[in-house]
Amino acid sequence: MFLNTLTPKFYVALTGTSSLISGLILIFEWWYFRKYGTSFIEQVSVSHLRPLLGGVDSSSPSNSNTSNGDADSNRQSVSECKVWRNPLNLFRGAEYNRYTWVTGREPLTYYDMNLSAQDHQTFFTCDSDHLRPADAIMQKAWRERNPQARISAAHEALELEDCATAYILLAEEEATTIMEAERLFKQALKAGEGCYRRSQQLQHHGTQYEAQHRRDTNVLVYIKRRLAMCSRKLGRTREAVKMMRDLCVFQLMKEFPLLSMFNIHENLLESLLELQNYADVQAVLAKYDDISLPKSATICYTAALLKARAVSDKFSPEAASRRGLSTAEMNAVEAIHRAVEFNPHVPKYLLEMKSLILPPEHILKRGDSEAIAYAFFHLQHWKRVEGALNLLHCTWEGTFRMIPYPLEKGHLFYPYPICTETADRELLPSKRHSKTHTVREVFHEVSVYPKKELPFFILFTAGLCSFTAMLALLTHQFPELMGVFAKAFLSTLFAPLNFIMEKVESILPSSLWHQLTRI
């Protein structure tokens, strides 16, 4: 009787309301997934419903060991998500700004430049700067956001005395060519060595002099490293290698923690690869590719390149599938798998499946920013080794079969950190704004690993919304026909239940069935 009294308007209202509700859920789920990378319904189910339904409580004493392991893993993920200064970062005036003049695009993000400003204040300032007028001016200059104001402050400091940090600022930001930057860095080196010798004699006279000597050491190392990079860019690679070797020795002799942030050995590796001095490259890797030292894409992929070089010229996937891999080929493949596990974004740039952009001034290890910085300088070295890119192309995707759940468990490294996408979007210029701020053009699409798939609940609500909306439209257009279909569907749905009830009535005595129905 109830089904027979329902009108088509009821079905229209029912399906329309269901479509509206499922559409709202779909919109919210999609927004939440785009912002946080997970489904809201799944997160609520795992976090709140599973413990109520008898799930494991992570706070119980019996699971204290598991909780401690998770905490250690979280601490490792946080450390791996630390942003590092790019050892091969370009010159802002001679390279980044020239790119902007030609293309109209900004290669650096505000977040990246702000990190550089913080680094400069850490490297080039100390508490005793107020004792020297030029250093006091430069202390304010490093905090200035306007580039022209920084350059004007550097010129003002040079009018008072030869200030090494003022020359550094002009070489980095005002010089429009590498040769001009090198000339300014040589002037900075002369001034910096004088300050370093004076502070070295006074470093034991108190904490103030010790801090000043530490600052002068940072300035001197920075200048020499940039001079070596100028020599590398101007084609004097052997001279650059000699300067970088001296810097590595100097870094080992000094015990200042900031010196390790320069990662000069990565500059040395790139220069040695340019000279094709693979024996020396192997010697550097033997010193820095240690289990106790932090890894990088440069370390892992250079080690893979050296092992691939031994077999890549004769490697054939067809022959390898017939006879199997030799020991040397197996070592090369394992080295490639190790490198890909550390940073899975690099192969697409080396194989030119994605276009390169200028590397940022800061990188995130294991992230897309580190992959761009590595491939920008090392793609030529992979091309120079015959067959190396072919071997990489044939084997790199095999890494993912060994780590089906990279966010939960790694093979040779810790699980892949989940924070890389967010940090890379801050470091890399994903969008370009025109001068009128009316046009937005895709500049670089950030590589995401592992590739996020749409959660089940988004697909389910999308299907539910579409289905109920279609039902509402058909019911509105053909009310009588849809009413017949609805009654037939409900009759078919309840047919098995009616059949079971009839069988029960035929088996049970009528008096007993009467008593049960009364109860």
Image (cartoon, helix red, strand yellow):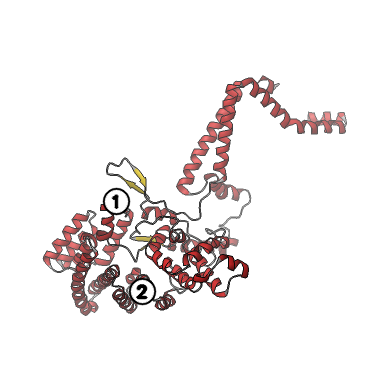
Say which of 313 and 101 sits in front. 313
Of callouts 1 and 2, the N-terminal one: 1
Q: Residue at x 58, y 31 (%)?
A: 468
At horizontal 27% and vertical 44% (from top left) the residue drawn is 435
User: Badge 1 is on which residue?
Assistant: 103
Tell me the amino acid under the disc marked 1.
Thr
Q: Residues within 10 Å of mark 2 (few under 14, many from 20)?
A: few
Q: In the rendered structure, which amino acid carries the disc numbered 2?
A: Leu
Tell me which residue sits at (59%, 21%) in the image. 9
Local SS, label 2: loop
Q: Quadrant of the N terminus?
A: top right
Q: Is residue 302 visible?
A: yes
Query: Foreground residue, 485 or 197?
Result: 485
Residue 77: numbered disc = none
- Residue at 49% x, 70% y: name it: 313
Q: Is residue 357 left or right of residue 60?
A: left
Q: Position of residue 52 (x, y in %)?
A: 60, 48
Can residue 7 be seen here? The reply is no
Q: Position of residue 347 (x, y in %)?
A: 46, 61
How far across and down, in percent of the image, does residue 482 sit? 64, 24
**Category of crowding for the residue at label 1, using alpha-carbon neighbours closer than 10 angstroms: few (below 14), some (14–19), many (at least 20):** few
Left/right of residue 471 with respect to residue 194 in the rendered view: right
Q: Quadrant of the C terminus?
A: top right
Q: Which residue is mark 2?
A: 275
Q: Percent position (x, y) of residue 454?
A: 53, 46
Q: Is residue 435 above or below residue 407?
A: above
User: Height in image: 122 above or below 20?
Assistant: below
Q: Nearer the viewer, residue 408 or 470?
A: 470
